[in-house]
Image (cartoon, rainbow, N blue to C red):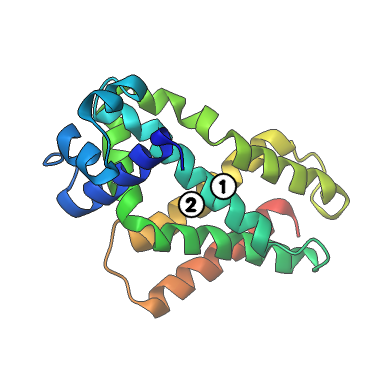
Amino acid sequence: MDTKTKLVFAAMAVFKKNGLEKTKVSDIVKQAGVAQGTFYLYFPSKLAIMPAIAQCMVAKMEEKLKNTVNPSSPLPQQLAQIVESVFETVEKHRDVLAFLYTGLTQSADITKWESLYAPIYEWLKDFLTRNAPLLRAGIQAPYTARVMIGCIEEAAEQVFLFSQRDAQDAARQKEETRVFIEHALGV
């Protein structure tokens, strides 16, 4: 693992343990096992590491999508797999996502969000393009991909980040999201 990656994983662990406000750069470098000056070779401040953490989370979501969605399954099943993948990723990494959103909003790095999500948007755009004959006429795949991931991720965050819902409530939210996406796509 290269030094930058070590710092990113160390930051995630320390932020998760101490919270964003209480974490110091010295905590991160201690966790990573590198000198404090090394941190500043990669990141000018504690908050500047947030886009790298976001990139890591996007990669996890993209990997989950690629490993879960079976292109030979019927389209409704693939859509359910997409919704399931995003919900599982948000649930599994809810602690990281909670401090990540806070950190990004406290810096100018929130403007990088769209570019960080480019791999997911591209994957969904390709998915929509491949399935265009089965979708409602007039779908604009690049825009629909952004709306689609935004909708699914927000629904998952409502369950796992912003409330104390039980498993049954989470399952209902996931199902309603799947049905909503199907209707929106004309499936």
Q: Position of residue 120 (x, y in %)?
A: 61, 42
Cα separation, mark 2 vs mark 1, equals 6 Å
Residue shown at the point (37%, 63%) measured from the top left: 159
The dot on residue 134 is: none
Q: Which residue is mark 1?
A: 149
| Kind of residue indicated by mark 2 | Glu
Task: Judge whether 166 appears above or below 105 on screen.
Answer: below
Residue reaching furthest bottom?
Answer: 168
Q: Position of residue 164 (x, y in %)?
A: 26, 68
Residue reaching furthest left?
Answer: 22
Task: Judge whether 84 appears above or below 52 on screen.
Answer: below
| Residue 125 in the figure: left or right of residue 110 | right
| Kind of residue indicated by mark 1 | Ile
| Residue 107 in the figure: left or right of residue 150 | left
Residue shown at the point (23%, 37%) measured from the top left: 29
Choose top left, top right, bottom left or bottom right for residue 42. Answer: top left
The one of 182 and 120 positioned closer to us in this rendering: 120
Q: How many marks?
A: 2
> The C terminus lies in which quarter of the figure?
bottom right
Choose top left, top right, bottom left or bottom right for residue 3. Answer: top left
- Crowd around label 2: few <14 · some 14–19 · many ≥20 (10 Å): some
The one of 184 and 2 positioned closer to us in this rendering: 2
Q: Position of residue 168 (x, y in %)?
A: 41, 80
- Crowd around label 1: few <14 · some 14–19 · many ≥20 (10 Å): some
Residues at discs 2 and 1 in contact (Cβ within 8 Å): yes
The one of 34 and 92 positioned closer to us in this rendering: 34
| Residue 13 in the figure: left or right of residue 156 | left
Classify mark 1: helix, strand or loop.
helix
Residue shown at the point (42%, 23%) measured from the top left: 111
Q: Position of residue 112 (x, y in %)?
A: 45, 25
Q: Which residue is mark 2?
A: 153
Classify mark 2: helix, strand or loop.
helix
